[in-house]
Amino acid sequence: MDTSRLTRLPDELLEAIVFYLPPHDTVAFGATCRRSNKITFEPLVWRAHCLQEYRYWESRHELKEKLSRPPAQTKWRLLFNERMQTDKKAADLFDALLETQQHRLERMEKVAAMGYDVKELLLKQRDGTPDEALDVLARRYHANALLGSIHRATALEKWTRLQNMQMVRLEEVLGAYDLFVLAGSKGDLSDMDRELDRIAESIRSHDPDFDTWSVRQKATEIARWLRAQNLVGNPSEDDYHALRNNFISIALFDEPHTSLPLQSVAIYCAVARRLGVNAKPSNYPHHVHAVIEASADTTLDAQHAHHLGPSTTLEIALRTSRNIMNSVQEVRQRNTTPRCATYPDVDAAWYSMLWSMLVLSDSNTAALLHRRRQILPYLVEHYQAHFPEDLNLLETLVAPMFESLREHHVLMHLITTARAADANQRAPSRRPNKADLRAFWIPGQGGVRYRIGTYFKHRRYHYEGVVVGWDTRCAADPRWMEQMQVDSLPRGREQPFYNVLADDKSVRYVADENIESLSRQPSEAILALAGRYFKRWDGTSGMFVSNIREEYPDD
């Protein structure tokens, strides 16, 4: 018989102790005897583990509904085990996709399909991988790419629901734009929900009689409180159209909390609804107002005339798209810093505008098809340059929009080609040996001097970049060579040319004579991008460590 002091404690105290144990220790304690096993099967224990270990949940779990029910009605331990199994499966896939380029896209799609159930895991990979890890850049880059893919899929689901006239809240529709540019630990739709709930509760608790007030009094107090907290509005005329002002999460979480009138009104309406005030935005030309609707059988102004009516959520969303388009164009005209160093990311913001313009529309079918045809080339260009992990979104959402049209054939060819390239092993490019150089030597030309992973500065245009591919001579088509005046270069077309990743996120083709290698620590702009091709930066050799050796085995 066990006579330890622990077993003398009543069940209630043991349950309280178990609440502070991590999940692994809870299982271990439950394996010691029948009594402890019974205690560790307590639903409240595993509900606590679920909530402590996992902040993000796929909607299919219906977590809010489960939390509203008595704990015993939900199999919390089984749910926790399911999440643990999902983590293990995703972690195995993630490790595998870092090992080889072959099937990388396929594995990324499988991880992304798990949605918010793997967000914690990916955040740990992105933000928790130590600097000394052998593949630190690759882990951080691909985890961030997967998070972006999951966020964008969520955003598109919200917009698709809106387009199909299904129920979706205004702050979800506008917050979907934020999901494209989300970079920090806050800003997800659930984070915005919690913050709006907190704001509403702060307003209510500020005056204990708030719930007894009239609609007019409540509406006025909400506006006063939001202004007092600097959560709405934008006092700076010079910074009025700044890109950041288009995103609700940035207005809520980041100083100085500025936003365009449309986002300010959306914040007001979301808070007001939580406080029992029916507020909706009015899309008045050059202005955005909040329209407060009285409850049944009452009016706010002792009259029934309506001078401003509420706008549809679709109208507000399309206006947001146009605002983002204008802000991005202004940034591109004025900004000279590397695009990847800006927040919100300009390319991601532009991508959100393109997707929303493609998905959302009014009822004019002919106008919709015309606009989609205009948007499609820009969307595909952005996908190929910056978001190749979105191939599945292109296949499931975009291709069906052009069914039986010529664009559908083009899209399916692009998709099929991309999947074949992902499934096939990359053909290796061997460095020319001495015999090759003797056989094909041209006076004035040497071999391929720079290796994959060389960090450099362009001799003429002074941008920084890193070598991600090479050819022994210019392999571009004649039209490109003529346009770029390759034959006017001192060493012409017969010198080696390099595919390089530049600090503005573009991939360029650069002549050997324009490469000036650097050995110092790369810029933050380059480090943020390099994980797509490299494992880490090696300060000793002054080179990036390649993660594309299948293509360039000698580098």
Image: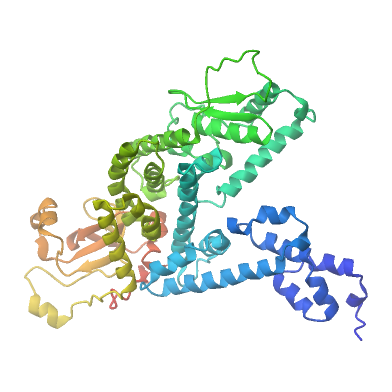
**Left or right of residue 553: residue 281:** right
User: Residue 335 sits in which quadrant?
Assistant: top left
Give the colouring mode of the picture. Answer: rainbow
Residue 249 location in percent, x, y?
54, 42
Q: Residue furthest front?
A: 404
Marks counted in the figure total 0
- Residue 538 visible in this rendered orientation of the protein: no
Q: Is residue 196 above or below residue 84?
A: above
| Residue at 21% across, 59% down | 510
User: Residue 416 sits in which quadrant?
Assistant: bottom left
Viewer-side residue, 290 vs 416: 416
| Residue at 39% across, 69% down | 104
| Residue at 90% across, 77% down | 7
Residue 122 location in percent, x, y?
53, 63
Viewer-side residue, 442 vs 22: 22
**Left or right of residue 336: residue 52:** right
- Residue 459 visible in this rendered orientation of the protein: yes
Quarter in which the N terminus is drawn: bottom right
Viewer-side residue, 397 vs 107: 397
Q: Residue furthest bottom?
A: 1
Viewer-side residue, 301 vs 542: 301
Q: Is residue 465 above or below residue 280?
A: below
Quarter in which the C terminus is drawn: bottom left
**Left or right of residue 411: residue 251:** right
Residue 511 location in percent, x, y?
18, 60
Residue 147 location in percent, x, y?
49, 58
| Residue at 40% across, 64% down | 531
Q: Residue furthest left?
A: 443
Q: Is residue 175 above or below residue 499?
A: above
Q: Is residue 372 above or below residue 388?
A: above
